[in-house]
Image (cartoon, rainbow, N blue to C red):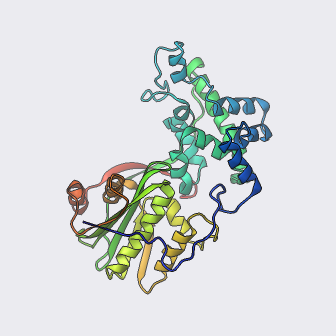
Amino acid sequence: MAPISLDLAPGERDRFSWKCTPDGKFTFRSAYELLSRNNNTDADMSWKAIWKLKVPERICTFLWLVLHGRIMTNERRARMGLASTAQCERCTTLSEDMLHLLRDCPISRSLWLRMVPTSLQREFFECGTSEWIKANILCRTRARHGTEWNVLFAVSLWWLWKWRNESIFQGNDPPRTQPRRQERLISWKPPPSGWTLINTDGASRGNPGSAAAAVCLRDDTGKWVARSVTNLGICSAALAEIMAVYQGLKLAWDYGIRKCILESDSELALSWLRTEPDPSHQFAHLISGCRQLLRRPWTTQMRHIYREGNRVADWLAKFGTSLSLGTYLYPLPPRGVLGILVEDASGYAMIMNVIVSEEDE
């Protein structure tokens, strides 16, 4: 094991990118919002935007309560002595805080899985409570049928709250439109003969938080070819994912591999590689670096894989968050991953109920 220096974008010049907007372009509005937050003033555009939504006033009032953590979840009722338990009465498994009620409870989650595009679901479900509410309230992207997303999001939150109350206090089950599911065996699958499989994954303990990018190269027999783990310091999960893809392609090329399949469990990172990024995109240098590697004289394929089929890279990425800053190459597998390698090579699989979105259909 040896640390090596990290070169993010060889041959690329640094670019200015404004981190307070999704496209990396500076706007006076985003600068004002940043200054307002830094000065701890009440001029938070996220809650001011609530009152400008084209929804009934009762929904605006409800959203104001949500943003300030004032709705009466079971957790809050128990804390105030108004309920005997904080447990969610719908799924009966976890404490019902606000995020569980509105997003993470299986009943609420089934609704969001129907509405949120597959490529954005991981980011949607990983945000903290405040960040999740604010980001979606400020998003005006047109959703299906031409409705602005923040309006659709606000109305959905209101109905989730209304259905929850009717279910608990009146015994009325909410109308549920269950997404179509398919049972699938999920496992690591070796590449065709003569090919090498590149499994990548990024991990972040918080978003942002202590992060790492991991790469795992195996041949068509499941034999360990090479691994690398990069501790990235403090960064977002999205940066860790795209960095893992870049490191995977570079490692494979440096090892003389010329026929490879790149697998990642991040659909967002893979989607970035399909088009040339805007120069102001916050990860433009990495995306361009990946695309340059893909254009080299070799044969490459990309495909999405579920995390259950990407367990080696997942283990390495989580392991990497505990290392010192830098990149580490492993000519031999760490002891903790040996069991997963044996299971992968033997064809071990897990049965999963995979939700098939309308886009997939």
Q: Quadrant of the C terminus?
A: bottom right
Q: Is residue 332 left or right of residue 147?
A: left
* Observer-nearest of 84 and 292: 292
Residue at image position (61%, 33%) is 160
| Location of residue 299 by image quarter | bottom left
Query: Image height check: is 9 above or below 48?
Result: below
Residue 80 lies, in percent from the top left, at 54, 15
- Who's the residue at 31% across and 79% down the image? 255
- Residue 105 in picture, x, y percent from top left: 50, 35
Using residue 57 as the reference point, say whether residue 247 is left or right of it.
left
Quick check: 103 left or right of 305?
A: right
Does 116 appear above or below 196?
above
Residue 46, percent from left and from top: 70, 42
- Please give the name of the residue rendered at 67% of the width and 38% of the height, measured from the top-left corner: 40
Q: Is 84 located above or below residue 68 in the figure?
A: above
Location of residue 157 (image quadrant): top right
At a point 36% along the width and 53% down the height, the residue shown is 321
Q: Quadrant of the N terminus?
A: bottom left
Residue 284 visible in rendering = yes
